[in-house]
Image (spheres, rainbow, N blue to C red):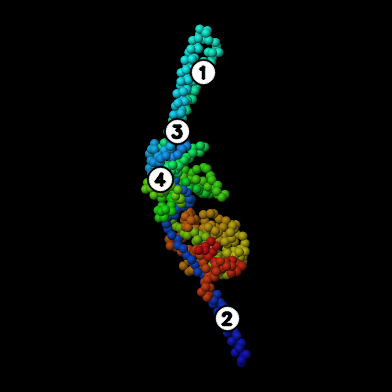
Amino acid sequence: MKKTLALVAVVIIVVAAIWYTNGAEAEARLEYRFVNVDIGNLESVVASTGKLNAVTTVQVGTQVSGIVNKIYVDFNDKVRRGQVIARIDTTLLVSSVEDARATLNRNQAQLDFSEVEFNRIKGLHDKQFATEVEMNQAKYNLDLAKATIVSSRISLERAVRNLSYATIVSPIDGVVVERNVDEGQTVAASLNTPQLFLIANDLARMEILASVDESDIGLILKDQDARFTVQAYDNATFVGRVRQVRLQSAIQENVVTYTAVVDVDNSDGRLRPGMTATVEFLIKKVENVFKVPNTALRFRPNEEMMAQMQASAGAESQGAPGGQGGAPGAAPGAAAQGGPGAQGRPQGGPGAQGAQGGGGFPGQGGRPAGGASNRGTLWYLDATGAIKMARVTTGITDGSQTEISGEGLEEGMQVIAGVSVAEGDGSFSNPFQNQSAGGQRGGFGRGGGF
């Protein structure tokens, strides 16, 4: 009797253990993260950075050396064309002018003497009282005096011109952006002309020299709209228009870029030369279209989801074997060998990166493996809670959301963007740790995590 009671107790314990284990496993459930399909506007843009500059700037220098005697303008001063903005000490320059003028007078006297002497010798030569040698010498002296006069006049003109260069005037109407000298400073104009001032023509109209990557430069066209922001005004967005796409390239750290010139209206004067602009070139815009966060297009089902789909498909097909090519009703391309998301799945199986043949689960970026680049897959739960998928055609993207189109889409429709597995004890499995050789258990889907 005691043996019978003991045997019954053991059976009860075993049954309870089996029931508890099965119950705990049954309590494990999938926790989904959903995002909505919305209707709205989308813009496709190319992002870049550049510097704000005045459209026309002139470097004002000096062609003569000397001490800066007087400065008449300062930073941000408006100037007119021909306005005197600085003077260089003229003491030595005036002396050069006087010396050149004295040399001219001396050579003029020599010329007058040579002309008189030539006329005298010529008269004697005509009466045969002077030799041919004397005649040639007199003619040579006259020609030499004439050439010396020409040289002296040029020297005087040069000295006068250098004296005028001591007065620095503005070549254009504009604003003084830079002033690089102070009164009393010595400037030396030898091989390189020193820059005294930098004058911008008109700051009411500026330009951005934006560096665009070679992979995007083909999308940038003349007269294309652009918008940009600057750090000085966090909540302000400015607009511009592409004026020029330059052919010249630049290579920095093995990256090839091209320069796009964007015209900017600065009538309010808020923008300043040298500001860093973050530019977005508007490539395409669509309105009132279905759009979904990119995480939903990147999401792929994990093992637990595929197990539920295969179980549902198996029940509907009355237990049809799935060992050859997948159970009827399962997702296209779902092979029986190596479950979905498994590391060792055969090439062409669900979710395999670079898989060949259409119908595989979508690869990264929401594109079907081996399929067209504008195709994607969304996963959702139907009215009964069963996992379903919808094929969609993708359009433009703004980097966070993508335009989609297809049958059965509705505004507010919830699609899966991530999934985790809730264990029986209420905890969640680690989505980044391999729980089995088959793949990541409880993960948020490859590319479908937060």
* Quarter holding residue 60: top left
Q: Secondary structure at mark 2?
A: helix
Image vertical order of residue 299 relative to residue 223, above or below? below
What amino acid is found at the position of numbered circle 3 in the picture?
A: Leu
Using the image as rendered, state which of residue 354 and residue 173 is in the foreground: 173
Q: CA distance from mark 2 to mark 4?
A: 88 Å
Are the residues tagged 3 and 1 within 8 Å (C-beta)?
no
User: Going from the N terminus, do you reach mark 2 or mark 1 first?
Assistant: 2
User: Going from the N terminus, do you reach mark 2 or mark 4 first?
Assistant: 2
Q: Please identify, in this view, whether the residue under mark 1 or under mark 4 is nearer the observer.
A: 1
Are the residues tagged 1 and 4 within 8 Å (C-beta)?
no
Q: Which residue is mark 1?
A: 141
Q: Which mark is residue 75?
A: 4
What amino acid is found at the position of numbered circle 2 in the picture?
A: Ala
* Badge 3 density bin: few <14, some 14–19, many ≥20, Cα 10 Å: many
Q: Secondary structure at mark 3?
A: helix
User: Going from the N terminus, do you reach mark 4 or mark 3 first?
Assistant: 4
Q: Residue at x 61, y 87 (%)?
A: 7
Q: Residue at x 57, y 61 (%)?
A: 351
User: Going from the N terminus, do you reach mark 1 or mark 4 first?
Assistant: 4
Q: Please identify, in this view, whether the residue under mark 2 or under mark 4 is nearer the observer.
A: 4
What amino acid is found at the position of numbered circle 4 in the picture?
A: Phe
Q: Residue at x 46, y 63 (%)?
A: 35
